[in-house]
Image: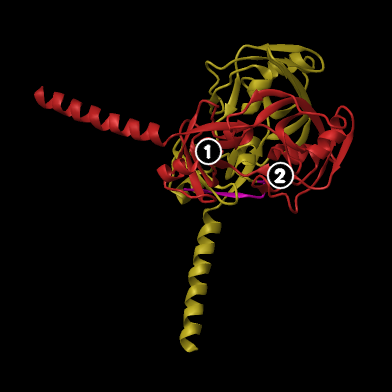
Chain colours: A red, B yellow
Amino acid sequence: MDQYKEFAKLFGEVLAEKQSECVEKSIPLGISNRHIHLSQKDIDQLFGRGYQLTMLKELSQPGQYACKETVMICGPKGAIEKVRVLGPARSETQVEILSADCFKLGVKAPIHQSGEIEQTPGVTIIGSQGTVILEKGVIVAQRHIHMTPEDAEKFGVKDKQIVSLCLLGIRGGVLENTIVRVNNSFSLECHLDTEEANAMGLSSQSKVYIN
Amino acid sequence: MDQYKEFAKLFGEVLAEKQSECVEKSIPLGISNRHIHLSQKDIDQLFGRGYQLTMLKELSQPGQYACKETVMICGPKGAIEKVRVLGPARSETQVEILSADCFKLGVKAPIHQSGEIEQTPGVTIIGSQGTVILEKGVIVAQRHIHMTPEDAEKFGVKDKQIVSLCLLGIRGGVLENTIVRVNNSFSLECHLDTEEANAMGLSSQSKVYIN
């Protein structure tokens, strides 16, 4: 009996240690649906000269927010309504769609990091006050982890490092080719799109781990 | 120079062996969109008494086919039109939806194997001639591999065994909890749904591997 108690105590300690290690190394998940970042020039064209985006909700990355404004995006094969605009305005317009949207729109968007819009297709964007014929800027976002330099040290990774994500649950598994992005202005968060999250059975309450 | 030639020959042989091993162990991929299997009773109700499903296209699993018929499925939060009916008729109606569809419909479908419809939600099905209020049968299909007993021997696996899938490419990774289903009437094929395939960057030309 004493032996059993000792074993139970030891087991409890090991478990507690493992749990705290897990909690310490867990990364919150942010799930992105299709969305669009707009340049001020395109905001003017879509919503009227000098128009300012209206904040609807702050996002977890500092300074980023979802806007009340939505647009329609149109490709040669179809259109998608109510695509959420994210603010603030950026230097260049970028449309981040789901892989399934490529079929709906008839647009072959590559899997790229945010900002890498050279050699990407365009799309036509319809706003309440005008239309923009975007020449390039449509991507499917490569999965990535935002973190601060302090986080990077804790996880033992560097900016632009490619890591694998470990995901638990009935649809769990490993996602390779996840890029680490380190910046003082970031908040620790792994970004997957809705198809990736659904495929792996994840919700916005899920945690992910670097493998 | 002779040494180099010998090395090149050896390297070529190793590569050829590895390649043939890979080709031998590769599994074709079938990508499923949302679809519905209907009982004859529900076919009668939806399309008219004694109605026979019309084959549109044979599927890769012997005897299975996509039908010309589609239905609308409705949940408390929304409806999805043009859900493809798959034939032939089954003993019980089963609706296989995507994880994203759960939000559209307002239905919490569990990730289940085909046929496991106890304790699953229902949905209302609208056909050209009538409506069925389905009490249960809505699932998100668990990823699985169909194979013959000969395939199972080749891969060293058994019916109902849980395996991991290895997937290559820019969105590659590992999908755990993939169930092996062995039956003489099956043809070797791994079934993922469109969200899983999109998340992993796969097309119907892709091959998958047991890890």
Residue A139, numbered label: 2
Disc assigned to residue A197: none
* Residue A196, image x, y percentages: 59, 36
Residue at x 87% of width, y 27% of height: A128
Q: Amino acid at mark 1?
A: Asn
- At label 2, counting other C-alpha atoms closer than 10 Å, the crowd grade (few under 14, some 14-19, many 20 or more) is many
Q: Which mark is residue B183?
A: 1
- Magenta residues span B203-211
Q: Chain of mark 2?
A: A
Residue A207 in the figure: left or right of residue B81: left
**Residue B162 vs residue A153, the one in the foreground:** A153
Q: Pick the residue in front: A55 or B62.
A: A55
| Magenta-colored stretch includes residue B93 | no
Cβ–Cβ under 8 Å for marks 2 and 1: no
Left or right: residue B16 compared with residue A65:
left
Labels in figure, total: 2
Check disc 2 and give the amino acid type. Ile
The answer as to whether the residues below labels 2 and 1 share one chain is no
Q: Is residue A41 above or below residue A83?
A: below
Residue furthest bottom in the image: B1
10 Å crowding of disc 1: few (<14), some (14-19), many (20+) = some
